[in-house]
Image: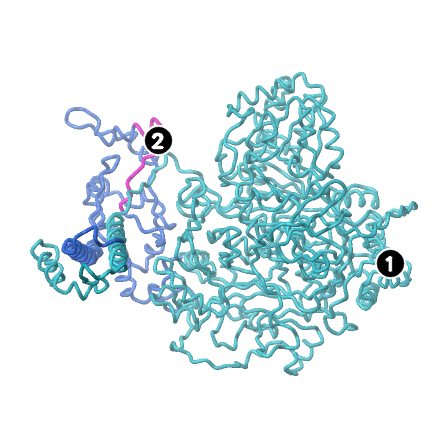
Chain colours: A cyan, B blue
Amino acid sequence: MSSNDALTPAGADAMHRGLAAVMPIGVSEVPIHDDHVDAPNASEMSRRSAMKLLSLTALLGATAGCVRKPERRIISLHDRPEYQQPGKPLYYASTFTEGNYPYGLLVKQIDGRPVKLEGLVGHPLNPNGKSTGAMQASLFGLYDPERLRSPRSGDADVTWAAADKAVVAALKDARRVLVVTRANLGPSERALIARFRKAVPGAVHMAYEPAQDRERRLAWQWIYGAAGEVVPSLERARVILSVDADFLGSDGDTLTATRGFAAAREPGSASFARLYVAESGMTVTGSMADHRVPLRPSHALAFARGLQAAIVGNDTAPLEQAAATHGWDAGVLVALVKDLRANRGTAAVLGGPNLPALAHEAIAEVNAALAAPLTWNAEPATSVAVAPRELLSAVASAPDAVILLGVNPVHDLPGGGFAAALAGVKTVVAHGLTADETLAAAHIALPSAHALESWSDASPAPGVKSVAQPMIAPLFGGRQQADSLLAWTIALSPDDVALKDAKDFHGWMQAQWGLKQAGWEAALRAGFVGTAAFAPLPTPRKVTVRDEPAPPTAGRMDIVLAVHPHTGDGRWQGNAWLLETPEPCNKVVWDNVAAMAPATARALGVEEGDPVEIVVGEARVRLPALPQPGVQADTVVLHVGYGRTQGAGHGNGVGVNVASLGAGVVAGTVAKAGGDRALVAKTQHVFDQNWSNTGTPMERHIAIDGTPKEYAHYQQGEKAAKYSFPDTKKHKIKLTQLDPEVDYSQGAKWGLAIDLNKCTGCNACLLACQVENNIVIVGKEEVAKGRDMSWIRIDRYEAGPEENPGILFQPMLCQHCDNAPCETVCPVNATAHSPEGLNEQVYNRCVGTRYCSNNCPYKVRRFNFFNYTGEQTTDPVQELRANPHVTVRTRGVMEKCTFCIQRINAAKFVASNARTPLKDGAIVTACQQACPADAIVFGDANIKGGQVETARKRDLAYHVLEELNVRPNVTYAARIRNAHPDLDAFVPAAADKGGH
Amino acid sequence: MDSTIFTRAFDRRVRTLLAVLGISVVVGGAFGTHTLWQANLEQGYMPAQPIDFSHAVMAGKHNIDCLYCHTQALKGPHAGLPTVSDCMKCHKEIQTKDAEGKLKHGLARLNEHWREKKPIEWVKVHDLADFAYFDHSRHLQPHTGLWCQDCHGDIEKMDRVKRVNSLKMGWCLECHMQAPTATTPAGWTTRAPINCSTCHR
């Protein structure tokens, strides 16, 4: 029967007749039975078949309905926007003003919308153009559907004019006004606040931060005699000691520190630095340590004093005594003192934000004695914040008006009590991106413009001014806080000519900069002016009064209120990308937990997820426990900023607010609390895989490390089995190759190389990939089911005793195997190999069998179990956030790392259109671009002497699971733990026993 | 379910009917889908546009080069549309009237857009699927020997633009698989690529 017959009624009839004849066989599940035989299943069966038929009919109907694509429009604009070419990216220099350090920012804009943020090459703060994870993810805030869309007075939406009028009326007869901002204001904003205070004589300005290293900044001021900040030059260091300073993760200028640290971590070179870390929690810095000593925060002063005696006073007795009392590994400390003494001029000690001032003083003297490679920033970008108690009493003293600009103290004031204090204030004005707790408590709530919609400037160091320019008109009718302040100041002091001339903050800033138009435009184009002038570290003052702090009370624990490496002090709590990024050390997402030593958890009788109650004075909080190897036994680490209730969108109801406990380190008690076990979602559950130096029965070389001694043996050709270094020549198992050999010597052959010596596990690559490749978030429950979508995961391996394990981070992504197991099992050819060695995934062809993922030995494929994109494709604002150069995936589709194929193609097209060869380094993948440690290189492995070929030729280079003969295109360099020669290998130290 | 609700004969008839109906739907649906799959609903698509703009007049009669208006074709992925102000560069002067002395309809509309600073929303005729990435600049390189008309048809003869080619993957591959080798700047020879990530990413 031809298809034409089927469409004619006659043909259809014939077909039906023919089918009716065979019906009893075709639908054999419908039995023919007589009246007396009871057949309860009969109608059940027919109903089922009827349902099948009905659903099939519906499906076919739906298919027919989708054939004609909907009409789409293509717009002729009235005028062409400057420089803009449709579909082509435009890059603007700007400054990252949301964080504490104003890094240079390069904003990629396509068709008028910012779609990707990167570091600005050449900027004084991050000259290599690298970025933190938070910088990458801050794009989320711009398109956040949670943003406030209109000024509000009480519960009613009002116009900006009405809101301004109300604010000005409240300020006009106010005698005492309190203006609260963050501490990271730029010079132009500070100048504006000075003008505001002139217009409102009773105004007081306070810079508020919920979790600043305030005590340390004050200690430095006390020690060095002037306000400023210590800036380490780690690239000059050969021995680094961190005393509870997470300088690679969450403490201070992490980009500068990571850049310096990575530069000093070239195995085999003369300047291969050794890192000692004494810390209470488990941080990425501690994970990178060559020798790590768990240190209770209360004992940090004894540690610093002992070190001071050993280095400055040449007397190791106090340190040895303290080590014996507190159970520190004496062998490590002896090696440390030896190392520090032997490396005068290239040894540095960094003190953490929670150390007592006296400990900083001891460290300062050690650094002075060592002539440490540290410099001094006399004008840091952020000012020292006000003490939380001072802010609270200022608000509680009932001023006439309180203006809160971009702060949320109702939620995060350490110690709490802000909402109650606000009750006595006549007018509360709050400016914020979303209707958060503070805006909800305000009389007048004003929507802010996002940092990418605002003008701003910053002064990161003496001699440098950095400028931030708006990338898009405010999406939700917001106004930047400085513009509001300017409008009010103009209304309150109509005689101020300079302000009137400025008109808006843009004009004010330009006037403050005092540049002519050409100079101003050049500054905008560059993103900054000047070069950073860091001063040598001042000589510490001799302080005579030695104030001994009270020793910790017995039975108490040290509660560390830590800044989260991703969501920070809570300022990115509404950012779903950052919430779903696993905490680097315990891999927890969407939560803050009470991280404690496994022994402590056992003593308390709790397991992962069991609620514990933490009591500090009057305050008590309950949150799930997490036994975490490496955390000091008498310490519990909590992350601040969680437990938002309003205005955080996806972040509402995530975690527990611990602000009531205070800030920094507090003494408290921890006890098992009744109640159900909570779900703690982690992206990794097993940490002790087959990577130890002794080898395992499987001898699987996944993450490889070793000591310099082992490395030397290896280099000399002693490839004994006990060394876990790679022997790339030997394949343990020869697997059959199904596909014919392919010659990749012609043209390009893409490869990626990752140096495990440099990777700090900071997750910047992961977030860059997320933004670049439109990777969705799935939420806590889905992550708990193992359905996280991130194309890169940072595997963390732990070995040694649980009190103090040795850590190895290994970024794992699609290895683009030339003999790919995924390709052979795809029934629809949705994953195939390109002639340039890429393992391609074709979304529109994928039918979602998941065979490929099952057959992948690296487990790097990600499946869309649901339509996770959700509103990203239907909400007209969120839609703008997606990178238009990457397909947005839907339900039922497999996805994975593409080696940033869009970037490869873009670079190839540019080179080819210009008839020039593609240069090595012309293609930079998103992860490589972001990596603050420069641990990733990408390029054409066929280029002789190119980055990838060089990385592959290193004797440390190996492929993961090479014995499977899958021929991966990602090369890893094994990590050398720079163990002190006296200690021979990485010897995990015993834990700080505590001792009271 | 109690089977005594219906008589046995009726039950059998209903079941038979349902089965016949079901099977005919399946088979008919399969044929229908196959037919629709083969048929090319996109080809020949010729929607009405908000302004009666004639390529036959502009590109045909007046012989204006495509790139004069579609300025980005050689430079980037999209050929680009002229902005309203681009149109008005000429049409400020050229305000053709018809026999009755009235301004031509399209021109009147254009003037309206210009006065009100209102963008023109054209109906997209050549609309690729979102998962396919096409780059005009790549296809207009000298070595390809391609002209606009090779894909868009005799556009200089069209009053209203019509899609003459299917723009389906098979149609793309027809060229890509036949295209001769070319020498790249790096010195190796290549063909028009046919691997997936050429267009899908």
Q: Residues within 10 Å of mark 1 (few under 14, many from 20)?
A: many
| Residue farthest along the right direction in this orientation | A544
On what subunit does the disc labeled 1 rest? A
Magenta residue check for A178: no
| Place of residue A868 in the rendered image (x, y in percent of width and height, measured from the top left) | 44, 50
The answer to whether A161 is drawn above or below residue A112 in the figure is above
Residue holding disc 1: A306
Quarter of the image for residue A832 reads bottom left
| Residue farthest along the front direction in this orientation | A36
Q: Amino acid at mark 1?
A: Gly
Residue depicted at 66% across the width and 77% down the height = A694
On what subunit does the disc labeled 2 rest? B
Residue holding disc 2: B118
Residue depicted at 24% across the width and 55% down the height = A50
The answer to whether A661 is drawn above or below residue A444 in the figure is below
The answer to whether A253 is drawn above or below residue A756 in the figure is above
Q: Amino acid at mark 2?
A: Lys
Location of the N terminus of chain A by quadrant is bottom left
Stretch of the chain drawn in magenta: B112-125
Please state which of residues A6 and A458 is positioned toward the viewer in this rendering: A6
Please state which of residues A836 and A942 is positioned toward the viewer in this rendering: A836
